[in-house]
């Protein structure tokens, strides 16, 4: 483990910027998200869970796949420097691993390269992730339901802890070790600093909520697919889609052509399964015309179908959807009520 005095943080960020396009949490007009930074002063080092998740670094809300015209098809120039992310929380690092199973490694069709997304792989495949320990988890954090935790390092290249006057940096991957190993602005950490990390980790873990038993979640949800509980739970959802856009694991998208004359571009844009027209077919038929069906789809996808398809839940417990929902539809309450529905024989809310 290494120590980085905060007086040298700006030097560190500038060094990182020489090799990487560096993203970090930034506050703009009161909202937080990840943006390119070239100095430490631009970074919001206090924010825990950013309003928008870092998925948009690797899977932008709108991106040009290619341009077309009379002279054929061409793709835009891609930036040469790989991406580094500073200040990404463990739940968000896990969300990128999940998305990589969908876009990057295409685990359902691994032998067929046509299912591996080159746009995603170009960004994520060479990235360097500096994960941040969560010293003070929020009341809406529930990553521990899914095997996560405030000091979980899975998927990171370097694990960092804000220890007040300094940061502690622990290389997790070979790539992380290679970058920070030779930096003059870092010094080896001592015993007292390691003890401090253990104390901070224990304190953070003690603030996490009681875990929900999700062992049978997939089966339990399938068993109540046709029960009226879905109508009751979805009654107050206004289908705004905010929960899906802020979610670090939601990845519905649409492909559209934007043309003018003989020129045009094909664009991939975020979409949401909560929108009524998301599943409307050319015939006009909509297999998920009702709000109940869309809410059910979102829950089933995250806590049942993803287990079958990818072997893990499509939720990290980041709590963003809890914070953003305009009608206070709390996904933790929804999930608890569904999982206990059979045992209780009714819906309590
Ligand atoms: S469903 Fe909600 S809590 Fe789960 S990852 Fe998405 S935004 Fe976070
Ligand atoms: S944020 Fe709330 S109201 Fe909006 S679509 Fe999601 S659950 Fe429904």
Image: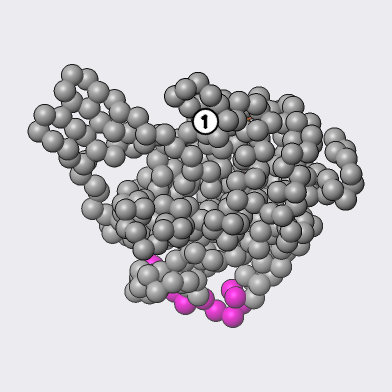
Report the magenta residues as a range.
185-194
Q: Quadrant of residue 152?
A: bottom right
Q: Where is residue 82 in the image (x, y as percent from the top left)?
A: 30, 56
Residue in the image at 68% along x and 50% along y = 141
Q: In x, y percent, where is residue 47?
A: 57, 46
Residue 95 among magenta residues = no
Q: In this view, does 182 lie to the left or right of 222?
A: left
The residue shown at (40%, 62%) is: 110
Out of 187 and 325, give the one closest to the viewer.
Answer: 325
Q: Who is closer to the viewer here, 290 or 84? A: 290
Q: What is the count of numbered marks? A: 1
Q: Is residue 59 visible?
A: yes
Query: Mark 1: which secondary structure?
Result: helix
Would you call the spot at circle 1 few (<14 residues within 10 Å), some (14-19), or many (20 or more)?
some
Percent of width and height locating residue 238: 66, 24
Name the residue carrying label 1: 279
Give the camera-side residue of 187 and 243.
Answer: 243
- In the rendering, at what x and y percent does residue 52 appear? 52, 40
Q: Foreground residue, 309 or 156?
A: 309
The question of residue 193 being in magenta is answered with yes
């Amino acid at each position: 483990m290494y120590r980085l005095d905060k007086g040298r943080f700006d030097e560190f960020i500038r060094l990182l910027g020489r090799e990487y396009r560096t993203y970090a949490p930034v506050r703009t007009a009161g909202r937080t998200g990840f943006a390119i930074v070239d100095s430490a002063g631009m970074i919001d080092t206090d924010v825990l869970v950013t309003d928008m998740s870092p998925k948009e670094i690797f899977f932008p809300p709108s991106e040009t796949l290619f341009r077309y015209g009379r002279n054929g098809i061409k793709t835009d120039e891609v930036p040469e420097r790989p991406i580094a992310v500073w200040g990404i929380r463990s739940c968000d690092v896990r969300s990128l691993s999940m998305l990589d199973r969908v876009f990057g490694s295409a685990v359902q069709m691994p032998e067929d390269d046509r299912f591996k997304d080159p746009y995603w792989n170009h960004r994520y495949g060479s990235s360097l992730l500096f994960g941040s320990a969560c010293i003070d988890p929020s009341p809406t954090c529930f990553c521990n339901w899914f095997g996560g935790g405030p000091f979980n390092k899975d998927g990171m290249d370097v694990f960092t802890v804000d220890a007040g006057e300094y940061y502690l940096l622990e290389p997790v991957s070979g790539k992380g070790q290679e970058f920070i190993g030779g930096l003059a602005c870092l010094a080896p950490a001592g015993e007292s600093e390691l003890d401090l990390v253990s104390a901070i980790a224990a304190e953070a873990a003690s603030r996490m909520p009681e875990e929900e038993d999700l062992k049978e979640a997939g089966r339990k949800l399938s068993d109540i697919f046709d029960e009226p509980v879905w109508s009751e739970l979805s009654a107050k959802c206004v289908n705004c889609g905010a929960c899906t856009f802020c979610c670090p694991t939601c990845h519905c998208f649409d492909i559209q052509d934007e043309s003018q004359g003989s020129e045009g571009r094909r664009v991939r844009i975020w979409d949401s399964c909560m929108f009524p027209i998301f599943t409307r077919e050319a015939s006009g038929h909509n297999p998920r015309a009702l709000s109940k069906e869309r809410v059910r789809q979102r829950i089933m996808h995250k806590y049942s179908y993803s287990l079958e398809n990818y072997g893990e839940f499509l939720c990290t417990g980041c709590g963003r959807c809890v914070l953003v929902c305009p009608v206070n539809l709390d996904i933790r309450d929804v999930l608890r009520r569904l999982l206990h529905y059979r045992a209780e024989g009714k819906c309590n809310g």
